[in-house]
Amino acid sequence: MIVAKKSQQKNKVKSKKQENNLQIELDQLREQLLASQEKEKRALADYQNLIRRTGEERSFVVKMANKDLIKKIIPTLSNLHRACQQLDDQGLILVADQLEQTLKEFGLEEIKVKGQSFDVNTMEAVDKRDDGEQVVEVMQKGYCLKGEVVQHAKVILGEK
């Protein structure tokens, strides 16, 4: 009987050790699982950020490509408008309007300055009459492309 009790005690000690070992192993596995889940969340966030940044960079490249092209076309548009004023040719006016409309579809907007106060961000003063700070005459139109100035308006300042 004494041998049986000792055997039972040894079995209890062994099962306690096994239970403790299993609990330690379970705790380690839980920690590994949490670490893996955290890594997965970070990887997913990094991937989503990469997708977002790639899209932003792509739209920036397209915008800049359009900007460079439009900056080169604006002088031609200005010359067409000058020719329209001098020649009063309906065909030429239609071509100028069509070109301007096409550029508007790509985000080009004329900066409206006539009668406005001088704004150094959108205008360049080429002459000043009197002491006024109002735009009294526009020498050359200014343009913005999607909110960014691509050509400052050349203006004459004066009093209204």
Image: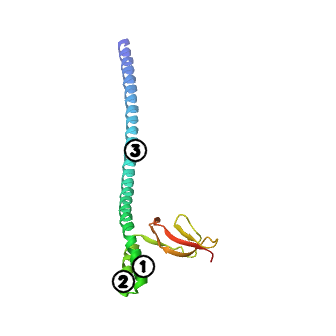
Closest to the observer: 59 or 134? Answer: 134
Q: Amino acid at mark 2?
A: Leu
Q: Amino acid at mark 1?
A: Arg
Tell me where residue 105 appears, x and y as whole percent: 39, 73
Q: Residue at x 39, y 21 (%)?
A: 12
Closest to the observer: 90 or 128? Answer: 128
Q: Earlier in the sequence, mark 2 or mark 1?
A: 1
Q: Which mark is residue 92?
A: 2
Closest to the observer: 94 or 19? Answer: 94
Furthest residue toward top: 2
Is residue 158 found left or right of 74 in the rendered image?
Answer: right
Secondary structure state at the residue bearing disc 2: helix
Q: How is the image coloured?
A: rainbow
Q: Does residue 40 lie above or below 61 as drawn? A: above
- How far separated are the C-alphas under marks 3 and 2? 60 Å
Q: Does residue 89 lie above or below 33 as drawn? A: below
